[in-house]
Image (spheres, grey):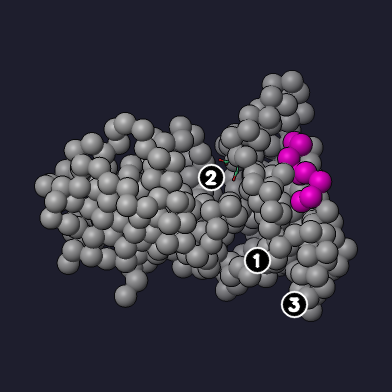
Amino acid sequence: MNKITVSAPGKLMLLGEHAVVYGRPYIVTAVGQRMRAIVELTEKPVFQLNAPDVQVENYQKPMSDLGKDDIPKGAKFVEMAVSQFTSEVGKTGIKVTTASEFSSQFGFGSSSASTVCVIKALSELTNKKLSNKQIFDLSYKTVLDIQGKGSGFDVAAAVYGGTLYFVPPGKMIEPLKIASLPLIVGYSGIKADTVTLVNEVLEKAKKYPKVIDDVYTAIGNLVRQAKKAILKSDWLTLGELMNLNEGYLSILGVEGRKLADMIYSAREAGAYGAKLSGAGIGDCMIAVTPAGKSKAVTKAITQAGGQVIDVKANVEGVRIEK
Ligand code: MEV
């Protein structure tokens, strides 16, 4: 076999943002919008990449130069993932084509999903047949080499799928076995700048260390309780805990007017609970909603200026496609 297609899901954070950076637990769910990668071993020792979603077309470089020189932003994760396999592929070249079912604007974790796809594909093509844990470790290492930091939950969601309770940095990854998750997802149209927001929160923590540390501890506590609620499919409690979590995110200063409008509108229209998902200010909000209220909640989010995205949560992790 010298060609394979692999796909991995995007992710949405359910609870625990920002506190996770300081060691508190976190819950993430894999979403039905998938990243796909076709990976091919080729004769010439050249790396080729086509990733139209991130404006990379016919990018090429000798395999011996992988990881060197300036790498275009859209090619970084795939190139560094491929570079983990240079010794296994010998003199062979590697051609990668990626296609995403979601916009990289949503904050669904497209970089991590494409990293995981490439590592899974090369693990199969080189007959290494890595386990999911090994794919997680290698993908997380790749992401850390590029970003310097990151909690690894988007990598975990792409590898394992489902809904995961996560203690950073990958100390514990516990799948929460549930049949479904009644989420409505609203996109704000604003791009969240994770690095800036994490730094702003850090500044706040330097100024008010005791207050902010108590906030992280409180978020950690509500995440532990949310885990129990999710395992019982107790969506009312999960919704209430999401509302508490949003309150703490507001204290951290990452709520933002637009997301807040969408969140409060969803609650007024009958959601059990709603909060932002991710770093804040932009990207998406999520609402846990009783079946009978989904139309009203969808309408309310739209009226507040959001775009409701049809998202299936709790989906399968990385897989080989036929
Ligand atoms: C961003 O998507 C989530 C944060 O907690 C950052 C991180 O955990 O890497 C804000």
Mark 3 or 2, which is nearer the eye? 3
Q: Amino acid at mark 2?
A: Val
Q: Report, in whole angstroms, how far the alpha carbon at label 2 lies from the one at label 1.
A: 28 Å
Q: Report, in whole angstroms, how far the alpha carbon at label 3 lies from the one at label 2.
A: 31 Å
Q: Residue at x 23, y 36 (%)?
A: 65
Q: Amino acid at mark 3?
A: Ala
Mark 3 or 1, which is nearer the eye? 1
- The residue lying toward the viewer, choosing from 172 and 115, is 115
Circle 1 residues within 10 Å: few <14, some 14–19, many ≥20: some
The picture places residue 293, in percent across and down from the top left corner, at 80, 74
Residue 256 belongs to magenta span: yes
The picture places residue 253, in percent across and down from the top left corner, at 76, 36
Q: Is mark 3 within 8 Å of ligand 1?
A: no
Q: Residue at x 45, y 51 (%)?
A: 55
Q: Quadrant of ligand 1?
A: top right
Mark 2 or 1, which is nearer the eye? 1
- Which numbered disc covers residue 167? 2
Q: Secondary structure at mark 1?
A: strand
Residue 147 belongs to magenta span: no
